Amino acid sequence: MSLQYSTEKQVAIAAVRRACALTSSVFNKLVKTETLTKGDKSPVTIADYSAQAVVNTILSKAFPSDPIVGEEDAADLRQDGAETLRNRIVELSNEALTADLGVGDLAEWGLGPGKERTLEQLLDAIDRGNDQGGPIGRRWSLDPIDGTKGFLRGGQYAVCLALIVDGDVKLGVIGCPNLPVNSIEPEGLKGCIFSAVKGQGAEQITISDAKRSPVFIPPLEPRMLNLLESMEAAHADLSFNQQVSELLGITRPPTRMDSQAKYACLARGDGGVYLRMPINPEYQEKIWDHASGALLIQEAGGVITNSLGKPLDFGIGRTLGKNYGIVAARKDVHAQVLEAVQKARSAQAAL
Ligand SMILES: Nc1ncnc2c1ncn2[C@@H]1O[C@H](COP(=O)(O)O)[C@@H](O)[C@H]1OP(=O)(O)O
Ligand SMILES: [Mg+2]
Ligand SMILES: [Mg+2]
Ligand SMILES: [Mg+2]
């Protein structure tokens, strides 16, 4: 008997691997043209749209009745004047979809040489990401490029795909094309895909040769803990993090990186705490920004809650609703972090 969600996992990893190859190839072509250093966002848009087209095409073939909550939609691409953009998306998406079958790929998912899609099919695939989420039923969440700023810098970004059933994340996959396979060799081989299935644990595979290793948060002495946090000061309250760090007696400096790569790092023990307190409480976190990471943390022996200690709710809609921040850490550390967060908050309120 095969394990629950084993087909979904195989499909999700295949889709994320192709999307990672696509985004890496866009980046490599971009640096040569310098468009990237000028901060022109359109090439990133090309990578985002194409990655969503590829993943949604594969999901729709393998699971035709599953809705998808995807970050992007094709409305702007359908406008007059977007022809160059559309042509690039068709080219990039078809390059990814028609690449030779890799480890675990099946031709029945519509992959491999000769499986080109038309412009209309690809735009429709992007628009398959229009599901509104909710508490009932089975659906996927997709962030085709999480950490746009990291992608632009040549830093960390992630392709994130999750399966959510009745508001509960059952499968999470995070592809990190720029993350070192082994954190103690930062200049070594890069490119990993993390996956977790509810109740079945978590693992990491290398993008290049699909080598597997289990993923779990090792016990870390408090002095060895450090905070994983956003690069972008606008995305999380980094000065609050500093106070929490001091209250916990953490001496190591924080590790700043973009995207759900932070969850991946925490899950394999590169860090110890992921703290994301809102700068702007009106900003509602999106489910595609946290679903895969949340399950990865839980399956690696961690706990993830908001700053009040309540679980994140992936069954509200496209967002996580009211923003009380996010706290993730190994089980034993999580309670200490929550306590420190409350203390830091009281100290702030007393000012
Ligand atoms: N004001 C905000 N607060 C928190 N997160 C934000 C905010 N604005 C955008 N984001 C999202 O944060 C995620 C990246 O987080 P991090 O900085 O930790 O890497 C992105 O998905 C980004 O969305 P977007 O994809 O639309 O840029
Ligand atoms: Mg994102
Ligand atoms: Mg994104
Ligand atoms: Mg975005």
Image (spheres, rainbow, N blue to C red):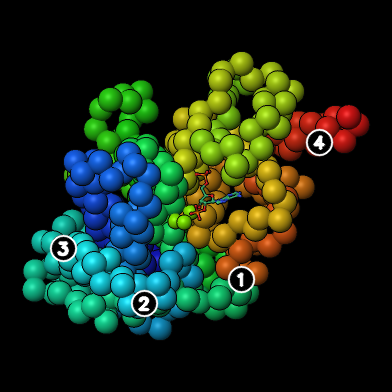
Residue under pointer 4: 345
Q: Position of residue 73 (x, y in %)?
A: 42, 71
Residue under pointer 1: 317
Q: Tag 3: Cα neighbours inside 10 Å, few (<14), some, or many (≥20)?
A: some
Q: Is 221 displayed left or right of 144 in the figure?
A: right
Question: Which dot marks residue 79?
Answer: 2
At 58% from the left edge and 68% from the top edge, which residue is drawn?
318
**Sequence-earlier tag: 4 or 3:** 3
Look at label 2 and name its amino acid: Gln
Q: Position of residue 266 (x, y in %)?
A: 50, 37
Look at label 1 and name its amino acid: Gly
At 72% from the left edge and 51% from the top edge, which residue is drawn?
281
| Distance Cα–Cα, label 1 vs label 3 | 33 Å
**Sequence-earlier tag: 4 or 2:** 2
Secondary-structure class at tag 2: loop
Closer to viewer: mark 4 or mark 2:
2
**Sequence-earlier tag: 2 or 1:** 2
Q: Is 35 displayed left or right of 222 in the figure?
A: left
Q: Is 301 displayed left or right of 323 in the figure?
A: left
Secondary-structure class at tag 1: loop
Closer to viewer: mark 1 or mark 3:
3
| Distance Cα–Cα, label 4 vs label 1 | 28 Å
Secondary-structure class at tag 3: helix
**Sequence-earlier tag: 4 or 1:** 1
Look at label 4 and name its amino acid: Arg
Based on the displayed image, in which of its 4 quarters is residue 273 positioned? top right
Based on the displayed image, in which of its 4 quarters is residue 319 positioned? bottom right
Residue under pointer 3: 95
| Distance Cα–Cα, label 4 vs label 2 | 47 Å
| Distance Cα–Cα, label 2 vs label 1 | 28 Å
